[in-house]
Image (cartoon, rainbow, N blue to C red):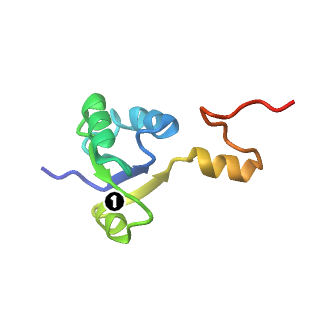
Amino acid sequence: MSRGIGILITGGYGTVGRRVAAYLAPGYPDRVVVAGRSDERAARLAAELGHGVRARRVDVGDPDSVEVALEGVGLVVIGPSRTSCARRSGVGWPTRTSRPTS
């Protein structure tokens, strides 16, 4: 079976990546690939979405995983991470242990 050119969504099981994958999967069957540092979470979402969505592990700190994740991929959608959004906005990201300051 020819899958065509893959569409890799990094941060694919996060809030934004999940929505992008769910939107694209029916229109691009067997082409959507959700990816993140956890191959288990990516695989769970791929199974949940159906339409031939595949899962891959990718971690920018591991160049080999990036190379493998890009195999057969023609388009990469980069999902925003909470950390990068917080840094760019200049606002610290709250954690469960954060307490409001007076």
Residue at position x 77%, y 30% in the image: 100
Tag 1 secondary structure: strand
Position in image of residue 19 (x %, y %)? 47, 33
Q: Nearer the viewer, residue 26 or 69?
A: 69
Position in image of residue 82 (x %, y %)? 59, 44
Query: Label 1, on which residue?
Result: 73
Q: Nearer the viewer, residue 58 or 1?
A: 58
Circle 1: residue type: Val
Q: How many marks can you see?
A: 1
Q: Is residue 37 above or below residue 26?
A: below
Q: Quadrant of residue 13?
A: top left
**Residue at the left extreme, as displayed:** 1
Residue at position x 68%, y 34% in the image: 98
Position in image of residue 45 (x %, y %)? 32, 34
Q: Please say whether residue 23 is visible from this viewpoint.
A: yes
Q: Quadrant of the C terminus?
A: top right
